[in-house]
Image (spheres, helix red, strand yellow):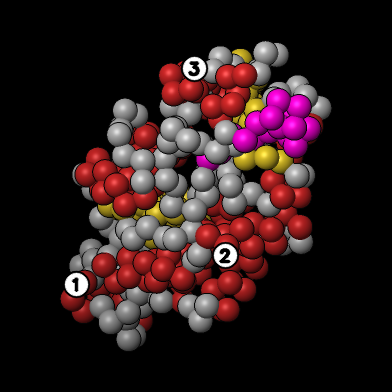
Amino acid sequence: MNKHLLAATSAAALLTLTACGGSDPLDSTSGSDETIVIGSQDYYSNEIIAEAYAQALEDGGYEVDRQFRIGQREAYVPEIESGSIDLFPEYTGPLLQYWQPETDARLADDVYTALEQVTPKGLRALDQSDATDQDAYVVTRRFADTWDLSTIADLAEVTDSLTLGGNSEGENRPNGPKGLKSAYGVDVGFTPIEDGGGPLTVKALQDDKIQLAIIYTADPSIKENDLVTLEDTKGLFLASHVVPLASDDVTDEAAAIIDRVSAAMSAQDLVDLNARSVEEELPAAVIAKDWLTSEQLL
């Protein structure tokens, strides 16, 4: 991880500190004595949240290294665990299942408590947000009407073959075909579509190449395309609140800044932020700055 010294009161003082190999953190009055590396998933909504973290920290005097659009959980969590990434916007339920696939926790507070308990040494979950981006099984309105579907359990009454579409990692995740079979007794095939529930996935649904997809509930495409989210009556999908995952290198002062961002973000805020990305095609930096400013966090 790149290290740097805080700006001192003079160039001579900076040279002296460099020669000594570091600065005394007790002498710091603001900011941090090292760059905070922030990552994000290869998912526009997650990038917006990561950008909000980055701008809030920069406003607090910290230097930030953005390493966004890394990929899916299987790719980036090892980087976090190794210490290559200091801060990452995550989601409570899916992250808990990554580390503890057989967890019994389902409700928001239970999931968060369980997550705190299994988070590896050197990492910690900061405060969870009210903002949620819940995994969900989604079908087209036409398919739901044809088979009278409102819950995941209703899929058991479909006599045609079913195919689930999603990122390739999803085939072996707890909410993939095996989880659907175990929880609801529903057999489905699987087709990999590598866009995280994006437009390719939606088109595959509309073209009936797949009949079922995992799309986040905060995705504006659900409303835009009149898709139907099936109710999860057996808790296959865990509560999924936005939660910052931080390394122990992130100071308590920096963590407090991130916790303020989390406290300010509501579930509706996240839907609205996502809509600005999809409908207005604005970059994450602009969307995050506008929101932070509106919440008086900048």
Q: Is any part of residue 227 visible from this angle?
A: yes
Name the outermost residue toward the right. 207
Q: Is residue 6 above or below residue 105?
A: below
Direction from residue 193 to residue 269 in the image, left or right = left
Direction from residue 88 to residue 227 in the image, left or right = right
Q: Nearer the viewer, residue 54 or 17?
A: 54
Direction from residue 121 to residue 3 in the image, left or right = right
Q: Disc 3 vs disc 1: which is toward the camera?
A: 3
Q: Residue drawn at (64%, 62%), measured in percent from left and top?
A: 272
Direction from residue 279 to residue 153 in the image, left or right = left
Secondary structure at numbered mark 1: loop
Magenta-colored span:
135-150
Closer to the chain start, of discs 3 and 1, is 1
Task: Give how far apart the Cα atoms at labels 3 and 1 are.
Answer: 60 Å
Secondary structure at numbered mark 2: helix
- Which kind of residue does numbered mark 2 sit on? Asp
Closer to the chain start, of discs 2 and 3, is 3
Residue 152, how many percent across, how many down?
56, 30
Residue 93, how many percent across, how many down?
40, 42
Question: Label 3: which residue?
Answer: 185
Residue 213, how many percent across, how many down?
63, 31
Q: Residue drawn at (41%, 76%), measured in percent from left and top?
A: 60
Q: Disc 2 vs disc 3: which is toward the camera?
A: 3
Question: Label 1: which residue?
Answer: 24
